[in-house]
Amino acid sequence: MHDFLSLTPEVAAALHDGRAVVALESTVIAHGMPYPQNVETARALEAIVRANGAVPATIAVLDGRIRVGLSDEQVERLATGTDVWKLSRRDLPIALAIGADGATTVAATMIAARLAGIAVFATGGIGGVHRGAETSFDISADLDELAMTDVCVVCAGAKSVLDLAKTLEYLETRGVPVLGFCTDDFPAFYARTSGLKVVRRCDTPEDVARILRAKWRLGLAGGVLLANPIPEADALDAAEMEAVIARALADVDARGIAGKAVTPFLLDRLKELTGGRSLAANIALIRNNARVAAQVAVACATGE
């Protein structure tokens, strides 16, 4: 194991025995949801992963170590801390060197999962190409990480505040397979479809596992994106959400918000503008992603 990694005994034993393990990110705890929903969701995700036959490994940086698997006390620390960094690839070595507490984004969670030997990771939605990126050059590090790091990321698409068409174009350029779980369409986070197509539809976890094995046995470095639509009962109307997102983005411009502060502000603003429905949808979709990720991890571990 890597010098900077600390695995819980449960995670270490599962990896040693070749059993299914699912990585979970911690940005949702520290920056993605208000307290106490963040703690409740973190614990629910771990329970869902276990109920579907895999071992959960929530990842964060605490006390100069990458923690793969968190105790209840560590989850509370992330959820209530006032100086928890939001860690991407750029920030990870700095936080480790100075002993900062940090919640891992998609990119940093992928790095940690790969170091630990975890092949499947469940999140809400990936970052991507921001609207107006042709002038701002604002493109999430998640996309390049997907091109480099051998992890399957299960998500409800990219966050719908992004330019989804450009995000898919970027992923194509970087050679990242974008699969749809029981769908031909790329989901738009709160909505089940964006009107854009995935590269390949997979109707079972075993279909996904076969593609993962083929990719990595060929020596093709980089991840796979498995897009899993929000359950129909929890989905929000796409047209309504587009109008709400436009209003929230206008608020971002009016207040001069930039960089890492944009996404947390937008999530909070969307919650306000939808009367809490966006938060409920966010919780529903990430729970659904944890379920599917566990099933994919089991299929990978059993070789089916």
Image: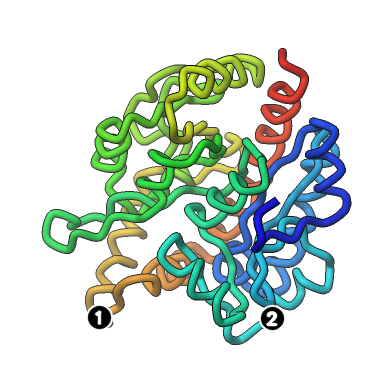
**Amino acid at dot 1:** Gly
Q: How is the image coloured?
A: rainbow
- Identify the residue at horizontal 88%, vertical 53% (top origin): 9
Tell me where residue 165 appears, x and y as whole percent.
Answer: 26, 38
Question: What whole-number distance in Å separates the C-alpha atoms at marks 1 and 2?
Answer: 27 Å
Quarter of the image containing the C terminus? top right
- Identify the residue at horizontal 61%, vertical 48% (top origin): 115
Element under disc 2: helix
Residue 276 sits in which quadrant? bottom right
Q: Residue at label 1?
A: 256
Is residue 92 shown above or below 193? below
Element under disc 1: loop
The single residue placed furthest to the left in the displayed view is 135
Q: Look at the numbered discs 1 and 2 and tell me whether their residues touch, using CB distance below 8 Å.
A: no
Tell me where residue 197 appears, x and y as whole percent.
Answer: 35, 24
Q: Residues within 10 Å of mark 1 (few under 14, many from 20)?
A: few
Tell me where residue 210 appears, x and y as whole percent.
Answer: 59, 15
**Amino acid at dot 2:** Thr
Dot placed on the residue nearer the N-terminal end, 1 or 2: 2
Of residues 145 and 105, which is closer to you in this image?
Answer: 145
Disc marking residue 80? 2
Of residues 190 and 239, which is closer to you in this image?
Answer: 190
- Identify the residue at horizontal 79%, vertical 58% (top origin): 43
Residue 26 sits in which quadrant? bottom right
- Looking at the image, is mark 1 or mark 2 nearer the viewer? 2
